[in-house]
Image (cartoon, rainbow, N blue to C red):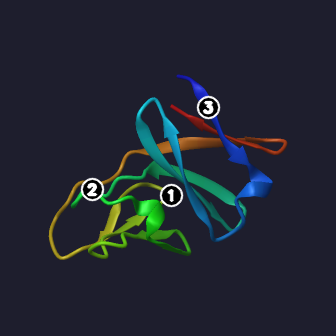
Amino acid sequence: MGRIIACKSSELEAGKMKKVSVDSKEILVANVNGNYFACDDTCTHAGASLSEGSLENSTVTCGWHAAQFSCETGKMEKFPAKINDLKSYTVVVESEDVFIEI
């Protein structure tokens, strides 16, 4: 398993999220009250970038059709139809560096 640096902790304020590209894979990194989480950035419904949606507590809402996912686990929380969950990743913070384990 490899680790990549996603950002510096000072670059991602609490309640914010960003997209990181790793080997043609797009990953969303979120700061929820000082805890960092990572999951796939692509909505499993229609392919929208979830980092362009909104984050409330630990729920990411897709900007296209309002599908909601937990950024902690990648599990779908709310949508009118059954769609696939997101892959989630382990995040490690060392000093100022936020790493994603791939």
Query: Residue at the location (16% across, 64% down)?
Result: 82
Q: Which residue is mark 1?
A: 72
**Relative image position of residue 76 (x, y in whole percent):** 32, 63
**Relative image position of residue 14 (x, y in whole percent):** 70, 68
Task: Kindly check if marks 2 and 3 are in contact, taking CB atoms under 8 A apart as contact.
Answer: no
Element class at badge 3: strand
Corner quadrant of residue 26: top left
Q: CA distance from mark 2 to mark 3?
A: 24 Å
**Relative image position of residue 62 (x, y in whole percent):** 36, 69
Residue kind at label 1, given as amino acid type: Glu
Corner quadrant of residue 73: bottom left
Query: Residue at the location (35% across, 51% down)?
Result: 86
Of callouts 1 and 2, the N-terminal one: 2
Of callouts 3 and 1, the N-terminal one: 3
Q: Which residue is mark 2?
A: 47
Query: Residue at the location (31% across, 76% down)?
Result: 66
Q: CA distance from mark 1 to mark 2?
A: 20 Å
Q: Nearer the viewer, residue 70 or 60?
A: 60
Query: Residue at the location (41% across, 34% down)?
Result: 24
Element class at badge 2: loop
Tell me if mark 2 has few (under 14), some (14-19) or many (20+) residues whose alpha carbon lies within 10 angstroms of its own.
Answer: few
Residue kind at label 2, given as amino acid type: Gly
Task: Kindly check if marks 1 and 2 are in contact, taking CB atoms under 8 A apart as contact.
Answer: no
- Asked if residue 84 is positioned above or below residue 68 in the image, the reply reads above
Q: Which residue is mark 3?
A: 4
Question: Is 93 left, or right, of 18 in this rendering?
Answer: right
Q: Residue furthest left?
A: 81
- Asked if residue 3 is positioned above or below residue 10 in the image, the reply reads above
Q: Nearer the viewer, mark 2 or mark 3?
A: 2
Question: Is 79 left, or right, of 24 in this rendering?
Answer: left
